[in-house]
Amino acid sequence: MLKKLNHIAIVVPDIYKAKKIYETKFNANVSELKNFKEHGVTVVFVELKNTKIELMQPYGKNSPIQKFLDKNPDGGMHHICIEVEDIKKIHKSLKEKNVRILGSDKPSIGSHNKPILFLHPKDFCGTLIELEEE
Amino acid sequence: MLKKLNHIAIVVPDIYKAKKIYETKFNANVSELKNFKEHGVTVVFVELKNTKIELMQPYGKNSPIQKFLDKNPDGGMHHICIEVEDIKKIHKSLKEKNVRILGSDKPSIGSHNKPILFLHPKDFCGTLIELEEE
């Protein structure tokens, strides 16, 4: 059911600084900044050999990650995103197993333009898990 | 400099329950429990196609992850582990760049029997990063 880890998402207070840290301390390849107005985030990706780290900063006034940053002003790990084959199938299966889905309780379209689900962290030992159709 | 993501480490209050959650909700392959007395943790690995999730529970009285669990009783994401080619070389390079190394300030041997370093989360936007020689 679980395929590849698509990314680890880390909320940061200053995305320019964060990009610079990964570039200068690790000589890492970091993508250019991208704003996702409809998702309320500005992101860059740090390239690893088998996956990527997504650094995210709130964008706009109603960013869904603003609360997290208020609680964790230095930033911190926010969620992990795991790929799945068929999001509708896994949605049905998880609902049958009483897993709580965040938001509209239905798959939505994420910032990579693919169907996604966010699962309630209380159902997964305090970890926010995003599932994305591969 | 940064190679593969070796694992994401998640602290959990009950490793039997956590193993069961990943097995039943996701039909995931989860390894058997392993105690690391000298590291103060009991772990299982959840298999993904390109990396793994390490679920960890404190083991013994002086577990280094007990404080984290006290602060996060439901559990939560604890650190990420990234592979590097040469730990001594990267240690020298990071020291020159004023990155703070946790513990003895020198590479030590981790639970995979490989040289590791833990970097100060304050130097990486609130994220605890473990580097492990590949």
Image (spheres, coloured by chain):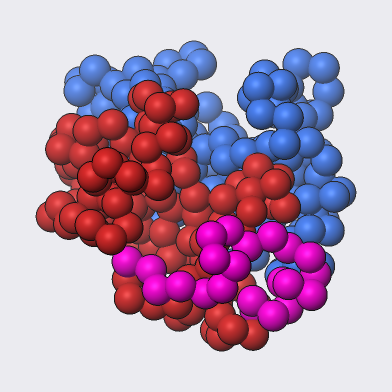
Chain colours: A blue, B red
Q: Which of the 4 quarters of the picture holds residue B120?
A: bottom right
Is residue B92 magenta-colored?
Answer: yes
- Percent x, y for residue A5? 44, 54
- Does the stretch in magenta take in B19? no
Query: Where on the picture, by quarter, is residue A78?
Result: top right
Q: Is residue A24 visible?
A: yes
Q: Residue at x 24, y 58 (%)?
A: B36
Highlighted magenta segment, given as a residue range: B90-111
Note whether residue A88 is visible.
Answer: no
Q: Is residue B6 above or below residue B15?
A: below
Q: Position of residue A114 (x, y in %)?
A: 54, 41
Q: Residue furthest right?
A: A16
Q: Please report the residue visible at 45 percent of the width from the left and 77 percent of the height from the top.
A: B115
Is A45 in front, or is B72?
B72
Q: Residue at x 45, y 35 (%)?
A: B68
Residue B9 position, x and y percent, is: 41, 50
